[in-house]
């Protein structure tokens, strides 16, 4: 099995969490997500990095459902599909740790799209951490957002210019239901990260 794929039991657990297989008569309160996310999640333990990217491109983003609504921004939908199918964050694993573990496939998914793809990926990451269901896990990962940006920077998932542009735009993830309050919290940590970068360049 390739080193950057997801164990089968983890895939099944996450599919249950997404509630993609709910077929009972009870009303489900969870936000509807695009079925392509579960397709990618199921495929993740079987595909190499290159094969995963090919599958992502094959599925496309036409009529994408993101956080319960239609998304016409193809790069934003694509980035959302990537983070939702690849990242796994809970009380035992932080966002930055999950990103580092998946850095090869994340970098491959971000490649070839330039500034627009980088911006979409950062917005999708922002939305991902802000929508974590467990309050304490969410709080911890917002507080450690600078570490997630550090992974992006160190492993060149996106370029530094994209991070600085994200930092200046509190509305970068407005189409992914990120509140102004959450956006400002993340940018406080983003500022700490950029100060660390700048200190190293002096």
Image: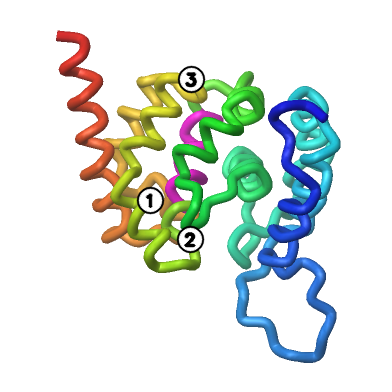
Return the disc, 3 or 2, that comes first in the chain's sequence.
Answer: 2
Q: Is most of the magenta stretch helix, strand or loop?
A: helix
The residue where tag 1 is placed is: 141
Q: Are marks 1 and 2 in contact (CB under 8 Å)?
A: yes
Give yes or no for residue 49 being in the magenta stretch: no
Quadrant of the image containing the N terminus: top right
Q: Nearer the viewer, residue 49 or 101?
A: 101
Q: Quadrant of residue 38?
A: bottom right
Q: Residues within 10 Å of mark 2 (few under 14, many from 20)?
A: some
- Which label belongs to residue 155? 3
Q: Is residue 118 magenta?
A: yes
Whether 196 is drawn above or below 55: the answer is: above
| Alpha carbon separation for disc pair 1 and 2 | 9 Å
Q: Residues within 10 Å of mark 3 (few under 14, many from 20)?
A: some
Name the residue located 70 percent from the left edge and 88 percent from the top edge: 27
Q: Residue at x 31, y 28 (%)?
A: 164
Picture coordinates of residue 173, whole percent (x, y): 43, 49
- Span shown in magenta: 116-127
* Quadrant in the picture for residue 191: top left
Residue 56 relative to residue 83: left or right? right
The residue under the point 67% across, 66% down is 17
Packing grade of label 1 (10 A; few <14, some 14-19, many >=20) is many
Q: Position of residue 147 (x, y in %)?
A: 35, 35
Identify the residue at horizontal 40%, vertical 22% (top origin).
153
Tell me where residue 83 appears, x and y as whole percent: 59, 44
Say which label, 1 or 3, has the lower sequence index: 1
Q: Is residue 99 above or below residue 181?
A: above
- How far is disc 3 from disc 2 in space, using C-alphas? 24 Å
Real-space Cα distance between discs 1 and 3? 19 Å
The residue indicated by pointer 2 is 132
């Amino acid at each position: 099995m390739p080193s950057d794929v997801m164990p089968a039991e983890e895939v099944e657990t996450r599919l249950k969490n997404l509630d993609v297989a709910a077929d009972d008569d009870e009303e489900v309160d969870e936000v509807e997500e695009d079925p392509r996310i579960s397709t990618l999640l199921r495929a993740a333990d079987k595909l190499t990095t290159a094969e995963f990217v090919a599958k992502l491109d094959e599925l496309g983003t036409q009529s994408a459902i993101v956080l319960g609504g239609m998304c016409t921004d193809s790069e934003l939908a694509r980035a959302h599909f990537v983070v939702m199918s690849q990242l796994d964050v809970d009380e035992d694993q932080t966002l930055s740790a999950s990103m580092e573990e998946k850095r090869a496939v994340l970098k491959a998914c971000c490649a070839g799209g330039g500034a627009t793809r980088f911006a979409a990926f950062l917005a999708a990451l922002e939305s991902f951490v802000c929508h974590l269901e467990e309050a304490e896990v969410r709080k911890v990962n917002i507080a450690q957002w600078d570490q997630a940006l550090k992974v992006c920077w160190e492993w060149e998932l996106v370029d530094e210019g994209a991070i600085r542009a994200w930092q200046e735009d509190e509305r970068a993830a407005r189409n992914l239901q990120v509140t102004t309050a959450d956006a400002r919290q993340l940018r406080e940590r983003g500022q700490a990260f950029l100060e660390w970068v700048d200190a190293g360049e002096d």
